[in-house]
């Protein structure tokens, strides 16, 4: 039996060229119910797509939940778990004094995550993890959607 209000969110981003055409994909699982999301952008980076995937997944939840975010991006997992508080404290500057890349998405992710009780889990990508492979396939579908836009 599924824990009450526990959602597993599996996310992935993809980019053909970096920067290049990118896509993001999300698999949401609540008990036996599943929902998939995907999208893309014509000029982006892999890190932006990794962030966008989690943002979109969290935005899709219409009430506060316990969420386990499964990501194969250490950038996302470490950024939200370890680096974000220091970036905010330093006025969105890195330890070296430079501007934090993707600040707009980090701010969106922080806002979305604050609505929920989130556990951030890293999974090894392209290692046969079924849900991560599904999120990867959705991200690649997002790339195709981005390529089809504005044709």
Image: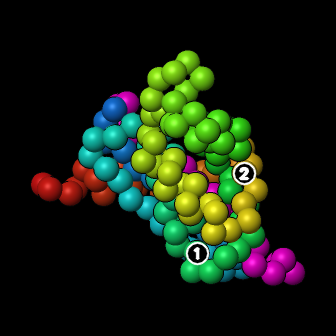
Q: Which mark is residue 61?
A: 1
> Which element carries disc 2, helix, strand or loop?
strand
Snapshot quadrant of residue 19 = top left
Prevailing secondary structure class for the magenta stretch in the rendered image: strand
**C-alpha separation, residue under disc 1 versus residue under disc 2:** 16 Å
| Residue 137 coordinates in the image, percent (x, y) | 50, 53
User: Could you tell whether 5 is left or right of 43 in the image?
Assistant: right
What residue lies at 75% left-to-right and 70% top-to-bottom?
66
Specify start and end residues of the magenta stretch as a single range. Answer: 1-18
Q: Mark 1 or 2 closer to N-term? A: 1
Which quadrant does the N terminus fall into?
bottom right
User: Could you tell whether 73 is left or right of 60 in the image?
Assistant: right
User: Mark 1 touching mark 2, by CB under 8 A?
Assistant: no
What residue lies at 81% left-to-right and 81% top-to-bottom?
4
Q: Is residue 38 above or below residue 105?
A: below
Which quadrant does the C terminus fall into?
bottom left
> Which element carries disc 1, helix, strand or loop?
loop
What residue lies at 49% left-to-right and 56% top-to-bottom?
108
| Residue 147 coordinates in the image, percent (x, y) | 25, 50
Say few, some or many: other residues with alpha carbon within 10 Å of mark 1 (under 14 / 14 to 19 / 20 or more). Answer: some
């Amino acid at each position: 039996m599924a824990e009450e209000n526990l959602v597993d969110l599996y996310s992935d981003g993809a980019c053909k060229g970096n920067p290049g055409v990118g896509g993001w994909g999300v698999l949401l699982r609540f008990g036996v119910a599943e929902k998939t999301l995907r999208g893309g952008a014509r000029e982006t980076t892999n890190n932006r797509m990794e962030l966008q995937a989690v943002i979109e997944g969290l935005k899709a939840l219409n009430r506060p939940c316990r969420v386990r975010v499964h990501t194969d991006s250490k950038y996302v997992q470490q950024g939200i778990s370890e680096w974000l508080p220091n970036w905010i404290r330093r006025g969105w500057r890195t330890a070296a004094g430079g501007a934090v890349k993707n600040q707009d998405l980090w701010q969106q992710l922080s806002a979305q995550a604050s609505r929920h009780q989130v556990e951030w889990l890293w999974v090894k990508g392209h290692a046969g993890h079924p849900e991560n492979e599904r999120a990867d396939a959705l991200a690649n579908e997002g790339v195709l959607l981005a390529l089809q836009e504005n044709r």
